[in-house]
Amino acid sequence: VRDGVVIIGAGHAGVQAADSLRERGYAGPVTVVAGESHPPYSRPPVSKQLLDHTVDPAPTPLRAPGFYRERGIELVRTRAERIDRDARLLHLADGRVVRYDHVVLATGARARTLPVPGADLPNVLTLRTVDDALALRPHLVAGARVVVVGGGFVGLEVASAARRQGAEVTLLERGDRLLRRAVSAATADRIVEHHRGTGVRLGFGEEVAGLVERGGRVVAVRTATGDVLPADVVVVGIGGTPEDRLARTARLPTRDGVVVDQWLTTGDPRISAIGDCAVVREPLTGTVTRLESVQNASDQARYVADLLSGATSRPYRALPWFWSDQGDLRLQMVLRTPGHDREVAVGRSVLLFDGGLLTGVESLNDPTTHMAARRLLEHAAPTDTELASADYDVRVLAKRLRRPVQVA
Ligand SMILES: Cc1cc2nc3c(=O)[nH]c(=O)nc-3n(C[C@H](O)[C@H](O)[C@H](O)COP(=O)(O)OP(=O)(O)OC[C@H]3O[C@@H](n4cnc5c(N)ncnc54)[C@H](O)[C@@H]3O)c2cc1C
């Protein structure tokens, strides 16, 4: 292809797409437009290692320094501003214009901010980028009063990191439990227990009503129930807003993210979207799914590279899995389909069933069960009865998978 593939965004999705295109033998030009000032880096350490004072505050690069040059991948350090679909031109913030055969939108998401006055004060911080982590890090010191808003994965990881540095941590969660849409009640309870055990104060049913300012800084958080919590720093972890502005201005369908079909293609056959910015529309039901995980970004990137290099023409399909490190607690989960009607706790894992079939497994510090569950669910969804016969040990069923087929 003469004008090549232009990938917008150099996060997990964008960099993997470029890497996989070359791996599949794609010989045309590959350009990655990287909107951040740091060389492309891994995002999970932003809320983990980068907040730990015993670890060097350096980003974790996604690829070795020579990688892009060696593979003939052009990394352009600027932002993409506008897609001219009629002329097939991409306008960059530095004034350059790039012609394309195909665009891959891999623009990720940005952190949501608190919808109250004072949310822009210097000690009210969100966490998405390396620069965000470098701004937060000095605040997480012994005795500092840290208020974390939001009991999602990022909020919980920050709470752990802050406690480890000796800060006093209060976490406010609007709902009546943690991670309602992400994990089962049984797993959420264990996570609560872990954080309480490390000294994090957890407040449920607590919303931020206002921020108390003095001398240009926030000094306290006022909650909707009337509490006033003194704060040296407020960390807002209330989720991400998909970065779909380029798609919107190019008049492509968006719906809290760039809408794509099962081939991860937008309303324009020359434009795909992958990773955190993409919402996949299910053709029969019309339901849309947007996932925020390294697995999703990487698998969608590999798929689009396959599609563009002619290695596949099938719709996208992948088994979603995820991890989160909260101090010395590692949550790993795999989820074939969302929703379940039965939870079975086995040791440090919880098995999720829907209609008598295993749909997911959540594990806390139980990596062998997690890996077995992934192998198992990659192949099929075993029944409740099959698992009962193995005492609900997914490792037993996963081992059987590797046995040769018995010939009668
Ligand atoms: C703090 C934090 C911790 C996380 N921890 C985990 C974890 O432990 N496990 C896990 O599975 N997932 C984790 N995630 C989620 C995971 O990191 C994301 O799902 C993943 O990074 C998504 O990759 P992406 O490439 O789609 O988007 P991103 O990583 O967001 O990358 C998108 C890039 O595109 C750039 N960009 C946007 N617009 C433009 C433009 N117009 N021009 C040029 N560049 C542009 C952005 O600046 C950004 O660099 C975490 C996320 C965060 C924020």
Image: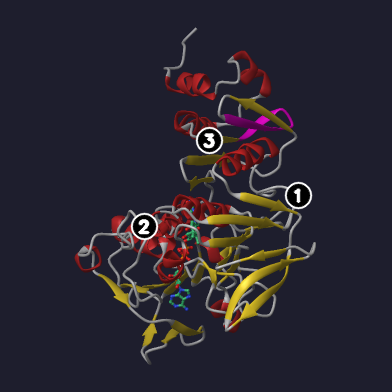
Q: Main secondary structure of the magenta part?
A: strand
Report which residue position mark 1 lands on: 176
CA gap between label 3 and label 2 equals: 25 Å
Q: Residue 384: which quarter of the image?
A: top right
Q: Residue at x 64, y 17 (%)?
A: 388
Outermost residue, top direction? Answer: 408
Of residue 312 and residue 156, the one placed in the foreground of this image is 156
- Nearest to viewer (mark 3 / mark 2): 2
Position of 119 compared to 263: left or right? right
- Nearest to viewer (mark 1 / mark 3): 1
Which one is earlier in the sequence, the residue at label 1 or at label 3? Answer: 1
The residue tagged with tag 2: helix, strand or loop?
Answer: loop
Report which residue position mark 2 lands on: 53
Which one is earlier in the sequence, the residue at label 3 or at label 2? Answer: 2
CA gap between label 2 and label 1 equals: 32 Å
331 is higher (above) or lower (below) than 104: above
Give residue 71's position: percent from left, percent from top.
23, 64
Give residue 48's position: percent from left, percent from top.
43, 54
Number of residues whose C-alpha sits closer than 10 Å to that of mark 1, classed few (under 14), some (14–19) or many (20 or more): few
219 is higher (above) or lower (below) than 338: below
Q: Residue at x 58, y 44 (%)?
A: 195
Give amino acid for label 2: His
161 magenta-colored = no
Tell me the magenta residue range.
349-360
Report which residue position mark 3 lands on: 364
